[in-house]
Amino acid sequence: MPANLATPIPLTPDEQRRARRPRVLLAGRLAYGPDWLTVDCTIRDLTPEGARLKLAGSAMLSGQITLIEVGSGVSHACEVTWRRLPEIGVRFLSSDDLTSGTGPEFARLRRMWQDARAR
């Protein structure tokens, strides 16, 4: 086989995104379900469109969840797009700054953020 005709290596699902996600190591907290249960996570990759998260617990997350970036106070309404426990991939649906938002939902998320920062 000529040197310039290499066999392509198939991409895994998380490598088929439009842009590479920059690797990060940030603290996060996920809120999910009707009772707003929480689980800590580590944000491993992050773009404006989504993230790869490593879960600290064994929660079965699906559908819509909320990711709180502990360091910055930004929350993201997310949709789980893939799952290979202990990691999941999420797509951001919307983002909010918890330092300036108002309303009951912001108050609850702000408390979760402040509790996570205090650890």
Image: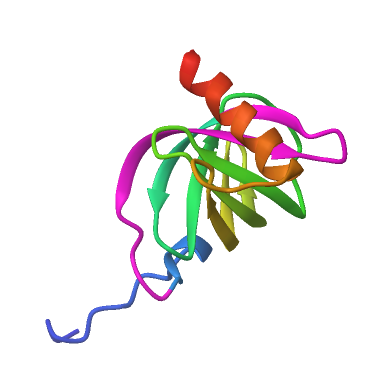
Q: Position of residue 111 (x, y in %)?
A: 63, 27
Residue 21 drawn in magenta: yes
- Residue furthest out toward the left: 3
Residue at point 31% right, 48% down?
23
Residue 7 drawn in magenta: no
Q: Is residue 61 above or below residue 114?
A: below
The colour scheme used to paint the residues is: rainbow
Q: Position of residue 92 (x, y in %)?
A: 57, 61
Residue at point 30% right, 54% down?
22
The quadrant of the image that shows the N terminus is bottom left
Q: Position of residue 94 (x, y in %)?
A: 59, 62
Residue 35 lies in quadrant: top right
Q: Position of residue 54 (x, y in %)?
A: 52, 36
Count the marks: 0
- In the image, 8: left or right of 103? left
- In the image, 58: left or right of 3? right
Q: Is residue 87 above or below residue 50?
A: above
Q: Which residues are magenta?
A: 18-40
- Residue furthest out toward the top: 119
Q: Name the residue nearer the viewer: 30 or 110.
A: 110
Which is the main secondary structure of the residues drawn in magenta? Answer: strand
Q: Is residue 84 above or below residue 77?
A: above
- Residue furthest out toward the right: 34
Residue at point 57% right, 20% down?
115
